[in-house]
Image (cartoon, rainbow, N blue to C red):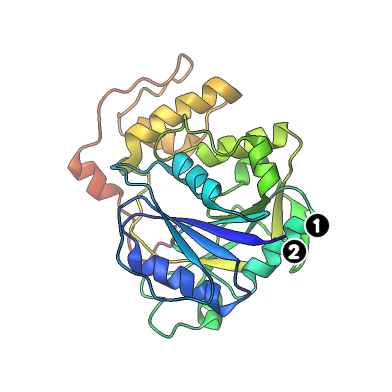
């Protein structure tokens, strides 16, 4: 099957160019679809594969709708969704494409989270592999093997592959999830309910380029609360519960969620600044 890579861009031009550079160093996809949420129309460097840009200007971060727009633009049997912050290893496209051809599921690869300053001009994959921190709660199988994820909630949309027909059968991302949060967990839960497994591929990695992070992510406070309530209404449990606990500890929402989420106030600029992670924290 042919393969298309889909990524979303909003203000991450340098990260996007490194993603495209990484794709060019390995087995190239038939196309890379770049959904431009922020309106960037400046020319990109020529690559070994077609790069199609899909204008999708939006003031917020409509992740579900933007990913679906990327899927509609793709004309390939295999879809690889890659976060714009991720640099693919040379074997990532080939490895995920092969896994999707052999197994019908949502297939995630391992992410190496890079510290600040790790990626410079002339970067080498061996350095990224050495510096990338694995996520502490996701354990991947040996290289070249595919294993079921311990639970659907461990699915992540940073880097995953799926057959286009399967994506369509699941219904894609639910655009009722507006902005940031829970849209990927909802996709995984709906996939599992439809008999589509969540799988982890060992071996090829993607390397997550550093950007400022927040814990809890107060910059997405309203989106997270709204999407958590939507997820709970559908699936009967609270997603992002660690973040919700963090909001409650700050007095932003009521601690008792038995009757739903009650917003008490919005975070202050001072709280936002205090939640910013130090640059030496990869996640």
Q: Quadrant of the C terminus?
A: bottom left
**Do residues under tags 1 and 2 come within 8 Å of each other at their CB atoms?**
yes
Name the one closer to the observer, 169 or 224. Answer: 169
**Around disc 2, counting alpha carbons within 10 Å, would you say few (fewer than 14), some (14 to 19), or many (20 or more)?**
some
Please state if 78 lies on the left or on the right of 237 as rendered. right
Name the one closer to the observer, 280 or 166. Answer: 166
Q: Is residue 190 visible?
A: yes
Look at 49% across and 34% down and name the residue there. 241
> Residue 281 in the image: x percent, y percent?
40, 62
Check disc 1 and report its element: helix, strand or loop. helix
Q: Is residue 202 visible?
A: no
**Around disc 1, counting alpha carbons within 10 Å, would you say few (fewer than 14), some (14 to 19), or many (20 or more)?**
few
Please state if 148 lies on the left or on the right of 175 as rendered. right
How many marks the image carries: the answer is 2
> Residue 96 in the image: x percent, y percent?
68, 62
> Residue 162 in the image: x percent, y percent?
67, 51
Q: Quadrant of the N terminus?
A: bottom right
Single out the residue that lies furthest toward the top. Answer: 259
- The residue wearing badge 2 is 98
Up the image or down, 199 lies above or below 264; here it is below
Q: Which mark is residue 198?
A: none
Up the image or down, 3 lies above or below 265; here it is below
Quarter of the image holding residue 200? bottom right
Single out the residue that lies furthest toward the left. Answer: 269
- The residue wearing badge 1 is 102
Check disc 2 and report its element: helix, strand or loop. helix
Please state if 58 lies on the left or on the right of 227 as rendered. left
Quarter of the image holding residue 58? top left
Quarter of the image holding residue 66? top left
């Amino acid at each position: 099957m042919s393969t298309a890579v889909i990524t979303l861009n909003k203000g991450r031009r340098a990260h996007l160019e490194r993603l495209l550079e990484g794709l060019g160093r390995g087995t190239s996809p038939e196309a890379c679809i770049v959904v431009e949420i922020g309106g960037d129309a400046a020319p990109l460097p020529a690559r070994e594969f077609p790069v199609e840009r899909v204008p999708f200007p939006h003031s917020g971060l409509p992740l579900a709708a933007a990913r679906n727009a990327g899927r509609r633009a793709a004309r390939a049997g295999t879809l690889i969704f890659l976060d714009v912050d991720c640099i693919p290893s040379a074997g990532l496209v080939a490895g995920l494409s092969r896994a999707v051809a052999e197994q019908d599921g949502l297939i995630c690869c391992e992410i190496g989270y890079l510290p600040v300053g790790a990626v410079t001009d002339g970067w080498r994959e061996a350095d990224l592999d050495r510096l990338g921190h694995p996520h502490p709660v996701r354990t991947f199988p040996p290289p070249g093997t595919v294993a079921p994820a311990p639970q659907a909630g461990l699915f992540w949309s940073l880097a995953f592959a799926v057959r286009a027909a399967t994506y369509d059968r699941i219904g894609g991302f639910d655009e009722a999830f507006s902005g940031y949060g829970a849209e990927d967990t909802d996709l995984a839960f709906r996939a599992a309910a439809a008999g589509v497994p969540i799988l982890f591929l060992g071996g090829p990695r993607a390397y997550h380029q550093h950007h400022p992070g927040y814990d809890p992510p107060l910059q997405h406070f309203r989106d997270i609360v709204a999407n958590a309530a939507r997820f709970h209404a559908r699936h009967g449990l609270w997603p992002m519960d660690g973040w919700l606990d963090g909001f409650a500890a700050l007095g932003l929402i009521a601690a008792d969620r038995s009757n739903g989420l009650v917003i008490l106030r919005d975070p202050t600029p001072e709280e936002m600044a205090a939640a910013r992670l130090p640059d030496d924290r990869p996640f």
